[in-house]
Structure formats: C-alpha cells, structure tokens
Image (cartoon, rainbow, N blue to C red):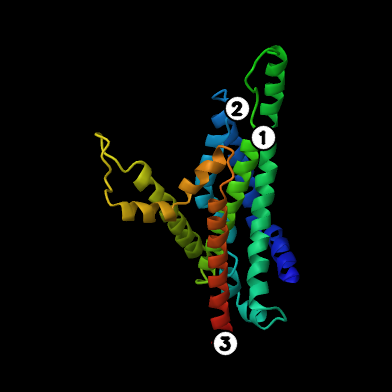
Amino acid sequence: MLAVYKKELRSFFINPVGFVFTGIFLTLAAFLCCFTTLKTKTYSTSNFFYYLVLSLIVLIPLLTMRSFAEERKMRTEQMLLTAPVTITGLVLGKYLASFTIFAGCLLVSCFDFVPLYIVGKAEAALNKDAITHIGPVTSQIAASVLGVLLIGAAFIAIGVFVSSLTENQLSSAIITIAVLLVMVAVNVLNTIGSDSEGTRLINSYVVRYIIDWMSILSRFSSFRYGILDWSALVYYLSLSFIFVYLTVRVYERRRWA
C-alpha cells in the first residue's frame, strides 16, 4: 500500500492535476475568506465553510477522476492487478493519496484566517472593557475543518469508486459531480421545501426522514457552529468506508475476470 501511495503522490505533481487542484483550491478559499469574513466585517467563519463544501462538488472530481480511469486508459491496469499488493492496499493507496492532497490544501487555506486574529487582537486592545469575545472562535474553525475533512473523505471515496467504473476521465468527473450534486441537493428539498404560507411541499414524514438521512449538508450544520456531532462523524466515515469497499469489490472481480 505504501508503494502505491507514494507513486500516486508523485504522479499528482508529475502531471498538472496536482498543481491545478492546489492552485484552484487555495485561490478559491482565499476569495471565499475575503468575501464571507473580511468584506462583510464579521468574525464568523460559518458561511466560509458552507460555501467551501459546496465548491468541493466540482473540486473533488478534478482530484479523483484519474485515480483508476487513467490506469485503464493507459493499459497499466493489469500491471497493478498483478503487482505484489493486495486489492485493498491498492485502493487504499490511491484513496489516501487523494485525501492527503485535499487535506494539505485545506490546512494551508486555514492561514487565510490569520488576518482575522490580527484584527481581533487589535480591536480587543482598543476595547479592553468589552465583555464579549472579539475575534474568530478557534473551536468553531477547528470543528468546521474537521467537518470539511470528513465530507472531503466521503466525496473522495465516491469519486474513486466512480473512477474505477470507467476509463474516461471526463466521464468520471461528470458522473461524480452529478452524484455529489444529488447528495447535496436533497437538503434543499427539506430546507426550502415549503410554500409562501409555510406549508411543507413534502408532507410525508418518512420521505423527509429519508431525505434528511441522505443529506450531506444537514449533518454539517453542527460542525459549522463549533459543535462536534458524533452521529455525523460516524455517518461520514461509514460513507467513506462503503465506497472504498465497493471499489475493492470492483477490482476483486476484475482481477479474477
């Protein structure tokens, strides 16, 4: 697994994919930080992480589209399948390499909050008698970062699974975007699912419960406000495990086909 992991990390920066993803991610994060905090003159980072999660719908497929699709297109898949490594190690190596790139970019983007701390300290010095906290709330940022990491892990698992089903990278990216859009859009049916009189458009409790269970965003709400939601943590980890397992099953069948 370690050999596959190192190979994948190197390949991200031998090809332009790693540089493109890193550049777009960090640039977008900087713009979001400016427009959701600095420009609006607020220390709340809730909106920043909300929009960042939405952007992952497009960014994550750029990272995962080549995971297995490129191997099939370049006819190097058989070399991987006959290599002295288990299928589980092969899939985990590729999955963890993509997650490492994503996690590294997310952690670097947290430096965008440094100006907020500087401004907060300056305002606190000017308002020594202020009772309320001045500056960004560190626990809120930490919980939000954890939430985004968990969502990113689930999205990457989905993207790697889709990539294992096709040899076309563009098709892999488009299908992954479509799947992630559906998983995020179901939350809209519950949150905006009411008419002007306040009556829900979806009246069935069972349907609303299923939609809420499938929703990625509804479980992220607690993280945005600095609350560690253990049920959401288990949900995101389970989602990641399921799609990694499905990818392993796909390649186990392909190895013996």
- Tell me which label, 3 or 2, sits earlier in the chain: 2
Please determine whether, in this image, residue 101 is positioned above or below residue 194. below
- Residue 58 vertical placement versus 2 (above, below): above
**The N terminus, quarter of image:** bottom right
Question: Which element carries disc 2, helix, strand or loop?
Answer: loop
Q: CA distance from mark 1 to mark 2?
A: 10 Å
Q: What residue is rendered at 68% in x and 59% in y?
A: 12
Name the amino acid type tagged 2.
Tyr
Amino acid at dot 3:
Trp
Q: Quadrant of residue 156?
A: bottom right
Q: Position of residue 96 (x, y in %)?
A: 66, 62
The three-letter amino acid code for the residue at tag 1 is Thr
Give the percent coordinates (x, y) of residue 227.
Answer: 58, 41
The circle drawn on residue 256 is 3
N-terminal label among 1 and 2: 2
Decide if residue 219 is on the left or right side of residue 29: left
**Secondary structure under the numbered disc 1 in the rendered image:** helix
In front: label 1 or label 3 = 1
Residue 138 disc label: 1
Left or right: residue 194 versus residue 246 is left
Residue drawn at 32 percent across, 55 percent down: 206
Characterize the local packing of mark 1: few (<14), some (14-19) or many (20 or more) Cα atoms within 10 angstroms: few
User: Dot 3: few (<14), some (14–19), or many (≥20) neighbours within 10 Å?
Assistant: few
Label 3 element class: loop
- Which of 20 and 80 lies nearest the eye of the viewer? 80
> In the rendered image, which residue does mark 2 sit on?
43
* Residue 180 visible: yes
Q: Position of residue 42 (x, y in %)?
A: 57, 25
